[in-house]
């Protein structure tokens, strides 16, 4: 998976198109990530105890990776991610500027 926890991403498709956010968690088997402040769903909760009021809770839902682009920390532009292998280590690189991410 080319996008990891802590990365800044730009949403390319969907209702939140054009927004930016930070990746909170990744789900590699489903190819989805959880982005802070994006893809919010409101959930109505019942009161648990007598005398308590019900609540409306906002939940972040995961987004599919193909709907995101990584924002390069060096050049600040949304770009594709590539890999470079040197000294038996694998690095992610920005396809725009060629710098290591």
Image (cartoon, rainbow, N blue to C red):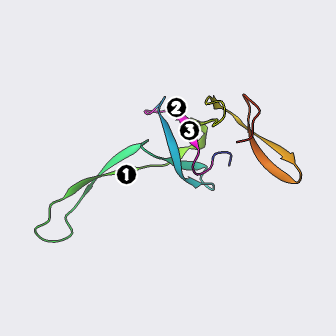
Q: Residue furthest bottom?
A: 49
Which mark is in front, 1 or 3? 3
- Whole-angstrom CA distance, mark 1 to mark 2, is 20 Å
Of 6 and 40, nearer the camera is 6
Of 88 and 31, nearer the camera is 88
Quadrant for residue 94, please give it: top right
Q: Which mark is residue 13?
A: 2
The residue indicated by pointer 3 is 9
Q: Which mark is residue 59?
A: 1
Q: Position of residue 16 (x, y in %)?
A: 44, 33
Q: Position of residue 31 (x, y in %)?
A: 61, 49
- Whole-angstrom CA distance, mark 1 to mark 3, is 19 Å
Q: Where is residue 27 in the image (x, y as percent from the top left)?
A: 58, 55
Q: Residues within 10 Å of mark 2 (few under 14, many from 20)?
A: some
Q: Does the magenta stretch mainly form a helix, a strand or a loop?
A: loop
Q: Give the range drawn in magenta.
A: 4-16
Q: Which mark is residue 45?
A: none
Position of 99 with respect to 30 (left or right) is right
Quadrant for residue 96, please give it: top right
Task: Look at the image and say whether residue 32 sits in the magenta stretch.
Answer: no
Position of 15 with respect to 92 (left or right) is left
- Image marks 1 and 3: residues in contact by CB distance under 8 Å: no
Q: In which quarter of the image is the C terminus?
A: top right
Residue sitting at x 85%, y 46%:
85
Which sits earlier in the primary sequence, circle 1 or circle 2? 2
Q: Is residue 65 placed above or below 51 in the rendered structure?
A: above
């Amino acid at each position: 998976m080319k996008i990891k926890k802590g990365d800044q991403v730009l949403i390319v498709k969907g209702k939140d198109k054009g927004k930016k956010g930070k990746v909170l968690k990744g789900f590699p088997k489903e190819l989805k990530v959880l982005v802070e402040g994006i893809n919010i769903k409101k959930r109505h909760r019942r009161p648990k105890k007598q005398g308590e009021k019900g609540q409306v809770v906002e939940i972040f839902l995961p987004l599919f990776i193909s709907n995101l682009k990584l924002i390069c920390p060096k050049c600040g532009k949304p770009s594709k991610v590539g890999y470079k292998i040197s000294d038996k280590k694998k690095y992610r690189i920005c396809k725009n500027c060629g710098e290591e991410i």
